[in-house]
Image (cartoon, rainbow, N blue to C red):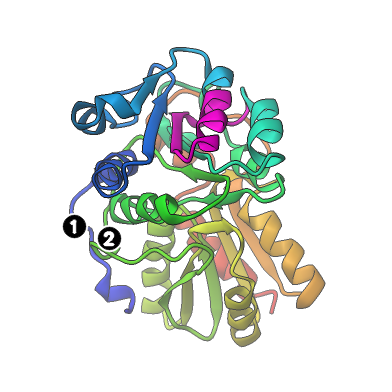
């Protein structure tokens, strides 16, 4: 596919992709169960619960307990999806995840909505920007950050087949839905969205769309952009990263996360070890968020299309 092949099929929130994926998983695998911490509607699990009430546990506002219950359920062969907001699914319960899930290598899927700045008006206490860093530091933890409704659904289905601890990150707002419907999701395999030779843009989550818009602007000016969707933060598709920068000679990394500890840090570490490359980063610059609309926050914190465009221009001058 090329840049012009990606069109918005109509805005949908990525959390709804998770909900649709869970319903399909439930129909296909009787061992799939869901747990929630008093946020059933927000996690779009209503249809799953209606069809499979005996396979749902409402844990209430007790996230640490939810993670521990989920870990225990795996002993009996269940595949639990523990769900809540990203802030409560990671920061609040990190000890339980580390000890009972990651260290114990339990087949728990932690599915987290309302990640990043774009949850909007709930503000800084809910806008966790450190979750990717927290989760990818845990040995054995798979970390996935899909970019739209279709990809979130596909990622959910893939995690139903995956064995081992995993973190699935998605968001609240309606967002362009532009990747193929009924796509195959391969954990740990980057998606080459457009081939180019001048600059590579690596993007994850909501910023894949912003990067796509920026790539179109750059291409219109004669800049050949290689755009790669890194939906799996860990394990990182190192081969795809190195192959691309070997061709383009410079890179931009874009994410709705703190510039420290996220995809940018991971790619920078790889490049430092294997192929030092001029790289720019579009991310939140080591700060907390605040209340506002998603568009206001993306603009204020430098995560808009123009910021990706400017970062690409800057890194091209560093080659």
Residue 33: say if magenta: no
Residue furthest front in the image: 76
- Disc 1 or 2, which lies upstream in sequence? 1
- Name the side, left or right, on which 21 lies relative to 221: left
Residue at 38% x, 31% y is 34
x and y percent of residue 215 in the render? 42, 70
- Name the side, left or right, on which 267 lies relative to 72: right
Residue 181 seen in this snapshot: yes
Residue 87 seen in this snapshot: no
Nearest to the observer: residue 257 or residue 314: 257
Q: Which mark is residue 178?
A: 2
The answer to whether residue 69 is above or below residue 312 is above
Nearest to the observer: residue 102 or residue 6: 102
Query: Mark 2 falls on what kind of element?
Result: loop
- Name the side, left or right, on which 129 lies relative to 56: right
The answer to whether residue 1 is above or below residue 99 is below
The span shown in magenta is: 67-91
Residue at 71% x, 72% y is 278
Is the residue under label 2 in contact with that under label 1 (CB below 8 Å)? Answer: yes
**What residue would you read off at disc 1?**
9
x and y percent of residue 1 in the render? 32, 79
x and y percent of residue 57 in the render? 38, 21
């Amino acid at each position: 596919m090329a840049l012009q092949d990606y069109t918005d099929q109509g805005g949908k929130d990525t959390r709804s992709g998770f909900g649709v994926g869970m319903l399909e998983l439930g129909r296909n695998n009787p061992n799939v169960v869901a747990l929630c911490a008093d946020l059933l509607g927000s996690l779009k699990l209503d249809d799953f619960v209606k069809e499979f009430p005996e396979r749902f546990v409402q844990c209430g506002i007790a996230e640490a307990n939810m993670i521990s219950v989920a870990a225990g359920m795996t002993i009996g062969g269940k595949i639990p999806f523990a769900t809540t907001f990203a802030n409560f699914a990671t920061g609040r319960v990190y000890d339980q995840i580390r000890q009972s899930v990651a260290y114990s290598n339990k087949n728990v899927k932690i599915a987290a909505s309302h990640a990043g700045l774009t949850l909007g008006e709930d503000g800084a206490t809910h806008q966790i920007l450190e979750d990717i860093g927290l989760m990818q530091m845990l040995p054995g933890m798979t970390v996935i950050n899909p970019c739209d409704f279709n990809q979130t659904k596909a990622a959910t289905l893939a995690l139903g087949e995956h064995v081992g601890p995993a973190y699935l990150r998605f968001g609240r707002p309606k967002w362009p839905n532009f990747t193929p419907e009924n796509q195959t999701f391969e954990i740990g395999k980057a998606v080459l969205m457009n081939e180019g030779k001048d600059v590579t843009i690596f993007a994850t989550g909501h910023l894949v769309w912003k990067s796509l818009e920026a790539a179109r602007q750059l291409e219109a000016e004669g800049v050949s952009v290689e755009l790669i969707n890194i939906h799996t933060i860990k394990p990182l598709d190192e081969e795809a990263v190195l192959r691309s920068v070997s061709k383009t000679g410079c890179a931009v990394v874009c994410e709705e996360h703190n510039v420290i500890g996220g995809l940018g840090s991971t790619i920078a570490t790889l490049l430092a070890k294997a192929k030092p490359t001029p790289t720019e980063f579009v991310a939140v610059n080591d700060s907390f968020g605040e209340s506002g609309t998603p568009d206001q926050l993306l603009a204020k914190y430098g995560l808009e299309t123009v910021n990706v465009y400017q970062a690409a221009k800057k890194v091209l001058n560093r080659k």
